[in-house]
């Protein structure tokens, strides 16, 4: 999908860079889908009472009436993944009067261009953590990158958490050793449910409005963040995907998923951005799990 010309181009955020970012988001999607599909094929889960065939991602393209579109890749009812979504979008248009007040550079000119990849994985097993990752590039009269990833285990384990954090720390430290402490703290603050006074999960990193003035360096950081997730999360899932679980553990997972729903519908920036800019509702709400419970 080729980015449309946008008169909002700023220095270092022109069409050539939009094409690079767009192509890379699609490449990252394909890499991650491939790794998750591989796990579906090799898994032999002990807890399944019925034979479930390994599933693959179904891809569906969509168009945004105001400009642009995307492609949803969703795996449903798999052996390992009850639902996994890896969505890529490239959209452009004008922010509403209400929303332009909240977006950097949009007050001066409401036109925008945005591309990104959004990933949410809801495993069948309650022993395998829920995971989320996204990276994005946005252009208004300003331009920036954002993204990150976080882990939401039902039953946290210190070694697993440390492994996940190390992957993002290594990605950040390649560029600037000051980044990871800042972006880890931002993640802890962002993925927090104030109405319950609890964190959504064990964290990761979160960043937004990242523009150092060096587009190539900022893009390289964003690529390393995405690649870190593609490497670490499937390996974490592989370690536990064949372990048996109990009905009590499955119910605990449903309740934890409820916290996920609450955050995404009440606080998540990506959900709000998508709905406020006329995005595809099915793609935006792809993050919601298929089976949830509230005690």
Image (cartoon, helix red, strand yellow):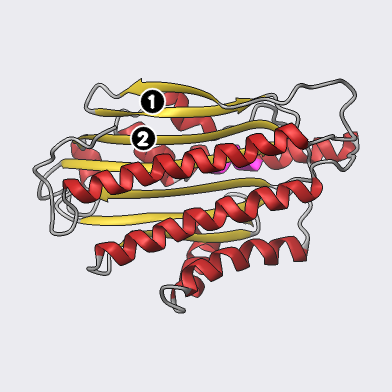
Which residue matches tag 1?
Answer: 280
Q: Is residue 216 visible?
A: yes
Q: What residue is pinned by disc 2?
A: 89
Crowdedness of circle 2 by 10 Å Cα count: few (<14), some, many (20+)? many
In the drawing, does residue 275 fall left or right of residue 133?
A: left
**Nearer to the camera, 158 or 193:** 158
User: Between marks 1 and 2, how big is the CA–CA gap?
Assistant: 9 Å
Q: What residue is rendered at 69% in x and 67% in y?
A: 162
Residue 118 percent across, percent down from the top left: 46, 41
231 in the magenta segment: no
Quadrant into which the C terminus falls = top right
- In the rendered image, residue 28, in percent from the top left (x then y), is placed at 46, 45
Marks 1 and 2: CB-CB under 8 Å?
A: yes
Q: Residue at x 67, y 25 (%)?
A: 55
Is residue 63 shown left or right of residue 132?
A: left
Magenta stretch in the rendered image: 259-263
- The reply to whether residue 191 is in sight is no
Residue toward you, 17 or 148: 17
């Amino acid at each position: 999908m080729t980015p449309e010309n946008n008169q909002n181009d700023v220095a270092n955020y022109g069409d050539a860079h939009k094409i690079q970012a767009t192509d890379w988001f699609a490449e990252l999607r394909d890499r991650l889908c491939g790794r998750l599909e591989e796990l579906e094929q090799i898994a032999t889960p002990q807890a399944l009472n019925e034979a479930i065939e390994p599933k693959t991602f179904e891809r569906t393209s969509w168009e945004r009436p105001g400009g642009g579109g995307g492609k949803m890749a969703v795996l449903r009812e798999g052996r390992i993944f009850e639902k996994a979504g890896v969505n890529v979008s490239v959209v452009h248009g004008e922010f509403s009067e209400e929303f332009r007040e909240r977006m950097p550079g949009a007050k001066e000119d409401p036109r925008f261009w945005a591309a990104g990849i959004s990933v949410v994985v809801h495993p069948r097993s309650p022993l395998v953590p829920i995971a989320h990752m996204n990276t994005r590039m946005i252009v208004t009269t300003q331009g920036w990158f954002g993204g990150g990833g976080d882990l939401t285990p039902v039953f946290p384990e210190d070694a697993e958490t440390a492994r996940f954090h190390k992957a993002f720390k290594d990605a950040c430290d390649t560029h600037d050793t000051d980044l990871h402490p800042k972006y880890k703290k931002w993640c802890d603050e962002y993925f927090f449910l104030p109405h319950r006074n609890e964190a959504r999960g064990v964290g990761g990193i979160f960043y937004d409005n990242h523009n150092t003035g060096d587009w190539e360096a900022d893009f390289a950081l964003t690529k390393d963040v995405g690649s870190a997730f593609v490497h670490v999360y499937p390996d974490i899932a592989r370690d536990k995907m064949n372990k048996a679980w109990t009905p009590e553990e499955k119910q605990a997972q449903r309740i934890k998923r409820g916290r996920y729903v609450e955050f995404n519908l009440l606080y998540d920036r990506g959900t709000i951005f998508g709905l406020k800019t006329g995005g595809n509702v099915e793609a935006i709400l792809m993050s919601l799990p298929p089976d949830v419970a509230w005690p």
